[in-house]
Image (cartoon, helix red, strand yellow):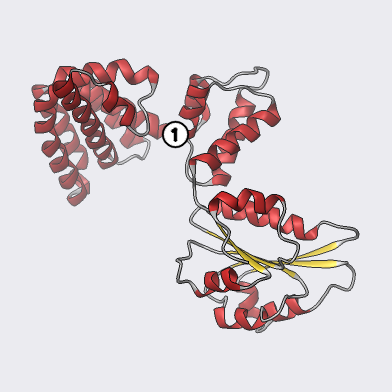
Amino acid sequence: MVAVKSSAVSRFLRSPDPSCRAVLVYGPDTGLVSERAASLQKHFAEGAGEAEIVRLDDRDFAEMDGRLSVELGTMPMFADRKVVRVSAGARLNPDELKALLAEPPAAALVIEGGNLKPDSAVRKLFEKLSYAAAIPCYAEEKNLGALIDEELSAAKVNIDRETRTYLMNRLGADQALSRSEIEKLILYVAGRDRITHDDIDAVVGDSAEVAVENFVYLVSGGDSRGAIRQLSRLSGAGTPPQIALAALGRHFMKLHMVAAAEAESGSADAALRKIRPPIHFKRRDAFIRDSRRWGAHRLQAALPRIQDAVMKARLSPALEQAHAERLVLALRSRG
């Protein structure tokens, strides 16, 4: 078989090629790798009678030489079929694996790999064998959207398009963690049939993310006292000031992009549409107001000051709170 393209993965998982006896699932999205490996394990185990599932990792290979060879080459005594699922690590030898897969194995094989490069020996092996397949797992917007639709549909909970987009932007890149967050959200809205922005703010993602966002809007809005209080809260909750400063730099870059576009064309709409993730509708009025209040020239002048504070905070962690507060006050006097 050839390498399964990202666009064809869902179709392959629904109906794997009957001749396929070994599958490598790899990529940076570890949650998605695990979910797809579990799906393939279930596929290979299905059928009349019992199936034996064998899980192996580096500890098993360290305890017994040739363990993978034994498991792949023998059928179980008290079951009709066997599935060997391997968590790939440093002890998975590509040359040994190549010898073991010189012909279709007696037991089905599913390997969970990491973020393998195109020249990886294991990946090239699975892409070349006619009875094997290599499945990539990358965090993609369509995968996340499908996950949201699948979970909410099963729970009979509705969500409008704008709120769905907001939820996608709040979820992370890990499929398993995203599924967990969606399940938590469904439990939170139990008894209601629709999810709102407020529901998402209440339970999805790290609360520190919201606190950092509050900080940057306090700064751009000219509330230095509120911003410094928010910095103290962040620090007390374990979020270093340099994280808040880095977010402030990104915020001011977006403000400058919109202000410059409006100064040039008389409209900020096109620039606003290019911002990713998009500005939350509840923040949109404040964002536009701050962009206009500062103006492109003053925003451009503020950016080097913010970058300088970020650098000083990184070089002197013991003084990062002081650097952050000094920046807030300096921006207040120029905003």
Q: Residue at x 47, y 29 (%)?
A: 165
In the foreground, 189 or 322: 189
Query: Where 43 falls versus 179 (above or below)?
Result: below
Query: Where 6 falls versus 84 (above or below)?
Result: above
* Count of numbered tags: 1
Q: Residue at x 88, y 61 (%)?
A: 50
Q: Quadrant of the N terminus?
A: bottom right
Query: Which quarter of the figure has residue 129?
Result: bottom right
In the foreground, 6 or 75: 6
Q: Quadrant of the C terminus?
A: top left
Q: Disc 1 residue type? A: Asn
Please give left or right for residue 162 compared with residue 291 in the image.
right
Helix, strand or loop at disc 1?
A: helix
x and y, in percent, of residue 322 in the image: 17, 37
Query: Which quarter of the figure has residue 239?
Result: top left
Q: Residue at x 57, y 68 (%)?
A: 127
Please give left or right for residue 295 compared with residue 37 in the image.
left
Question: What residue would you read off at disc 1?
Answer: 169
Query: Where 247 falls versus 92 (above or below)?
Result: above
Please give left or right for residue 8 compared with residue 255 in the image.
right
Query: Which quarter of the figure has residue 20?
Result: bottom right
Query: Can the viewer see residue 111 in this picture?
Result: no
Rate crowding at label 1 as few (under 14), some (14 to 19) or many (20 or more) other CA atoms within 10 Å.
some
In the foreground, 29 or 59: 29
Query: Can the viewer see residue 3 in this picture?
Result: yes
Q: Residue at x 28, y 25 (%)?
A: 270
x and y, in percent, of residue 73 in the image: 76, 79
